[in-house]
Amino acid sequence: MSLTHSSAGAASAAPAPARVDLARTWLLRSPLAAGGDTAADVLVLDLEDGLPAARKAEGRERARRAAEEAPVWLRISAAGTRDGEADLALGRDLSGGLAGVVLAMCAGPADVAHVAASLPDGVPIVAMIESAAALLSAPAIAAHPATRRLAFGTGDFRRDTGMAADRLALSWPRAQLVVASAAAGIAPPIDGPCGPVEQARDAADHAAAMGFTGTLALREAAIAGAHAGFTPASSEVAEAQALLSTVPDGPVDGSYAPALARARALVSRAEALARL
């Protein structure tokens, strides 16, 4: 299943609101790169890290042309910066050609508010948490009405905090994003890029266990593994359905309730993905 796919570097259709919440893979691609189909659920034209400083204007123009063919997702630079404002100006000009934005370096809810006020009403915003300060503000960022999902910018977060690329070290910030999203009532967060392509499935399995339901990706080759990790296997669905069908009569004790909640969520997600 692909929620969007590219043609000449653009997504062929904007994902419906529910699909934004369900999307498993978000492929970041420079608008300077050659077009081509992608198996990713969402293709994001990267105006931030995907463009060298000397080619920002060229990249925005290419994104504009791509949006003439079909609505596009844009990764935009930090709110309030010169590049961020130029990216927002482009987003306004695209009007119906803008499917959504991934906001890089989101520092707090004020950044989300600024972006939301600068774009047409209802444009979904995925806020990237990429610093220690942003992580501490994650509950407020997630609670902003314009925030659809959080995404973990692992590279910049590690640079800011000095943390190693170690699962144990990064388990706390990952858990914070999952908790913030759940408390705000928004879809689970999107993990950072998996690293080496051969680790894509393992990274997705780990992120899914942490409570994430999607990931950013930098290479097309990582998509298949990521999809497998974030898509409930038929055996898992069958096991969850069996558990739900044998719920005992009467009150359920506290040790049983979490298993039931996870089983319901897994079956619900599997059914929703199957309908797309």
Image (cartoon, rainbow, N blue to C red):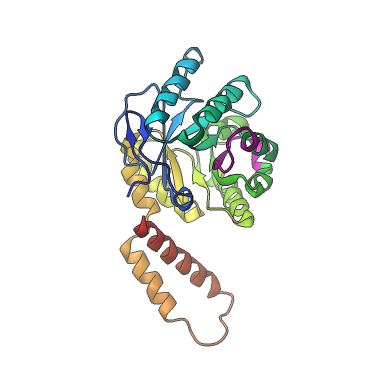
Above or below — where is 217 with respect to 229?
Answer: above
Quarter assignment of residue 157 = top right
Q: Nearer the viewer, residue 13 or 38?
A: 13
Does 119 lie within the magenta span?
yes
Q: Nearer the viewer, residue 158 or 31?
A: 31
Looking at this view, name the residue that lies furthest to the bottom.
Answer: 249
Task: Give the image location of residue 143, x and y in percent.
Answer: 66, 49
Is 111 situated left or right of 273 in this image? Answer: right
Does 43 lie within the magenta span?
no
Is 222 situated left or right of 193 in this image? Answer: left
Magenta-tinted stretch: 116-135
Q: Nearer the viewer, residue 57 or 241?
A: 57
Is 70 situated left or right of 211 in this image? Answer: left
How many marks are shown on the rendered structure?
0
Q: For the point 49% across and 12% down, which residue is it?
A: 54
Task: Give the image location of residue 114, x and y in percent.
Answer: 66, 34
Q: For the point 36% across and 66% down, which residue is it?
A: 237
Task: Give the image location of residue 36, x and y in percent.
Answer: 29, 31
